[in-house]
Structures are given as structure tokens and as C-alpha cells.
């Protein structure tokens, strides 16, 4: 798991890490191109990855995609959990139980995979308290999601100003 704030370097770090881990690389993109700026951003990110990556755009059903592409030679980069939770929030509206169930499906999946998965997520809980209920709910859901994924991950790295801080690493 790679965490950090906006523009902290987390996506670049995760991409570089995955480029070292293997050649069968799959990028799961949870962003949706809902406006021109996001379309341009998505195209720029695709170009940065190059042709050595297979890109799968999936905003909701990430567990199924991970399972479909998992094998002992695969390296899957999911970028990002932050947008996935936002997408789930839009789908399920007021039903936090459904969102938490999706998170538990992901955690269960991560425990069973044979390949490697790197997940990117923002840490949005280190700033000011949001001024409205929806934003506070989103912050809380994402914070709880990050805790669950960090618990299930072998390694957790936080990026601050482009510098990696190892929060959890595999026992040797």
C-alpha cells in the first residue's frame, strides 16, 4: 500500500516499484473521465506508463478485476482507492454498510492472491475537518478503508514531499 497526500509522489513511487517487480503489469484505473481536465489527466498518465502496461479502467468492481488478472507472475497496480471510495459513495449514497462490505471483499481478496498488488490511496484525514456532512463521511470512510487495507498489506509506504516513509514492512 502506498499512501500520501495530493501530489506527494505516491503514484510515481508505486509505478516505479511495480516496474521493478515484474513484466506482467496491469494498471487498474478507478478514475472516471467526467470532464475535459480529467480526460487530459488520464491520457497523460497513460502516456507516462508506456506500452509495457495493460490498463483496465474500472471504477467500481475492482475485486473482480484483481481476481481476473491475478497469477503468480502478475503485478497489479490499483490507482486509486481514494476515487474508488468516492465512486462507491456515489453508487450507494447513504448506505455505508454496502461500502464497508465492498472494502471487506477487497481485503479478503488481497489475502488470497498469488501475484503482487500495489494499492495507492490518499490520506485525507490529516487536514482540517471538512465543513459538511458528506465530506466528513467520505473522510471517515476513506480513513477506515485505509486502515483495513494497511492491516491486510505486507508493506505500507507513506510519501511525504516525495520522500518514502516505511510504515510497515515484511518480516524477515
Image: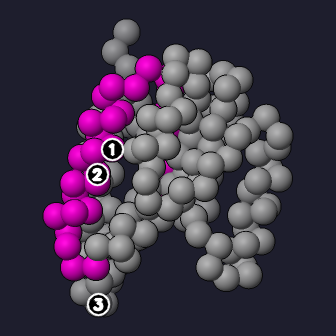
| Residue bearing the label numbered 3 | 132
Contact, mark 1 vs mark 2 (Cβ under 8 Å)? yes
Residue at 58% x, 29% y: name it.
75
Q: Is residue 151 above or below residue 29?
A: above
Local packing at callout 3 (Cα closer than 10 Å; few below 14, some 14-19, many 20+) is few
Instruction: Give coordinates of residue 14: x percent, y percent.
Output: 59, 41
Q: Quadrant of the C terminus?
A: top left
Q: Earlier in the sequence, mark 1 or mark 3?
A: 1
Is residue 65 within the magenta segment? no
Look at the image and give the residue range highlighted in magenta.
93-122
Dot 3: what SS? loop
Dot 2: what SS? helix
Local packing at callout 2 (Cα closer than 10 Å; few below 14, some 14-19, many 20+) is many
Residue at 16% x, 64% y: name it.
97
Q: Quadrant of residue 167?
A: top left
Residue at the bottom extreme of this rendering:
132
| Residue bearing the label numbered 1 | 106
Instruction: Give coordinates of residue 8: x percent, y percent.
Output: 58, 57
Residue at 63% x, 23% y: name it.
21
Q: Quadrant of residue 60?
A: bottom left
Contact, mark 1 vs mark 3 (Cβ under 8 Å)? no
Local packing at callout 1 (Cα closer than 10 Å; few below 14, some 14-19, many 20+) is many
Q: Quadrant of the N terminus?
A: top left
| Residue bearing the label numbered 2 | 103
Q: How is the image coloured?
A: one colour
Dot 1: what SS? helix
Q: Gap in Å between the C-alphas at discs 3 and 2?
A: 24 Å
Instruction: Give coordinates of residue 117: x percent, y percent.
Output: 49, 33
In depth, the one of 117 and 168 nearer the eye is 117
Amino acid at each position: 500500500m502506498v499512501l500520501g497526500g495530493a501530489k506527494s509522489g505516491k503514484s510515481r513511487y508505486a509505478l516505479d516499484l511495480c516496474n521493478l517487480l515484474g513484466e506482467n503489469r496491469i494498471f487498474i484505473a478507478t478514475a472516471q473521465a467526467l470532464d475535459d481536465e480529467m480526460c487530459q489527466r488520464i491520457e497523460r498518465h497513460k502516456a507516462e506508463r508506456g506500452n509495457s502496461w495493460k490498463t483496465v479502467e474500472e471504477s467500481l468492481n475492482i475485486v473482480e478485476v484483481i481476481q481476473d488478472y491475478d497469477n503468480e507472475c502478475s503485478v497489479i497496480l490499483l490507482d486509486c482507492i481514494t476515487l474508488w471510495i468516492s465512486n462507491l459513495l456515489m453508487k450507494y449514497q447513504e448506505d455505508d454498510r454496502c461500502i464497508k462490505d465492498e472494502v471487506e471483499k477487497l481485503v479478503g481478496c488481497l489475502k488470497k492472491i498469488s501475484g503482487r498488488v500495489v494499492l495507492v490511496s490518499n490520506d485525507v484525514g490529516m487536514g482540517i475537518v471538512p465543513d459538511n456532512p458528506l465530506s466528513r463521511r467520505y473522510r471517515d470512510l476513506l480513513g477506515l478503508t485505509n486502515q483495513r487495507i494497511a492491516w491486510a498489506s505486507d508493506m505500507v509506504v507513506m510519501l511525504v514531499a516525495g520522500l518514502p516513509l516505511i510504515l510497515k514492512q515484511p518480516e524477515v
